[in-house]
Image (cartoon, rainbow, N blue to C red):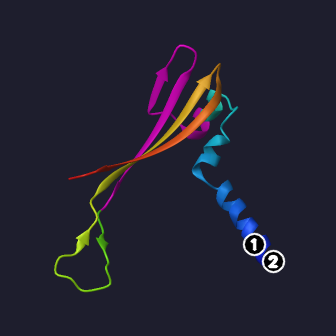
Amino acid sequence: MAKYIYFILLVVLIAGCGVQSRINKMKGHTVSSMLQELGKPTTIIPRASDSVYVYEIKKELASTEINKGALTLDPMVTPTVEKTDKYIFVVKSGYVVETRHEKTYIRKQ
């Protein structure tokens, strides 16, 4: 019985600590509270009925060697990539009404 309780608790913790669930908490907040908590956005896109606030975080991920468990003369190496996290907030009438998180990876040569 204790195993089931631990499993359910683990699932709830994993679901509650995700990136999307954290930014979903911003729904219903005002623009000023969002700016106070997150800072100045990278881009603001005004539209006819609302505005889109975009926050971007770019990080370069270095290449690493893939260990195949054996000694080889030509090791396999992952490429260097640039990871971009985009946090997108749609604001209507001064309140956050929609949130999204997008992740992209661009391979560097």
| Front position in the image: 36 or 6 | 6
Quadrant occupied by the N terminus: bottom right
**Residues tagged 2 and 1 counted as in contact (Cβ below 8 A):** yes
- Quadrant hosting residue 6: bottom right
Image side of residue 81 versus residue 109, left or right: right
Q: Is residue 58 above or below residue 1?
A: above
Q: Secondary structure at mark 1?
A: helix
Amino acid carrying label 1: it is Tyr
Q: Which residue lies at the image location 62% right of the left edge and 21% below the top edge?
A: 92
Q: Secondary structure at mark 2?
A: helix
Amino acid carrying label 2: it is Ala
Magenta run includes residue 39: yes
Q: Which residue lies at the image location 60% right of the left edge and 25% below the top edge?
A: 91
Extreme-right residue of the structure: 1
Q: Which residue is mark 1?
A: 6
| Mark seen at residue 2 | 2
Q: Which residue lies at the image location 31% right of the left edge and 61% below the top edge?
A: 62
Query: How many numbered discs sit on the rendered protein?
Result: 2
Which x, y percent locates residue 65?
A: 28, 72
Q: CA distance from mark 2 to mark 1?
A: 6 Å
Q: Which residue lies at the image location 52% right of the left edge and 26% below the top edge?
A: 52
Which x, y percent locates residue 37?
A: 60, 39
Give the class, few, some or many, for how many residues have Cα within 10 Å of label 2's Cα (few <14, many ≥20): few
Image side of residue 65 versus residue 97, left or right: left
Q: Is residue 51 above or below residue 33?
A: above
Residue stretch in magenta: 35-62
Which x, y percent locates residue 22?
A: 63, 47
Q: Is residue 9 above or below residue 81?
A: below
Which x, y percent locates residue 103?
A: 45, 47
Image side of residue 80 versus residue 38, left or right: left
Magenta run includes residue 32: no
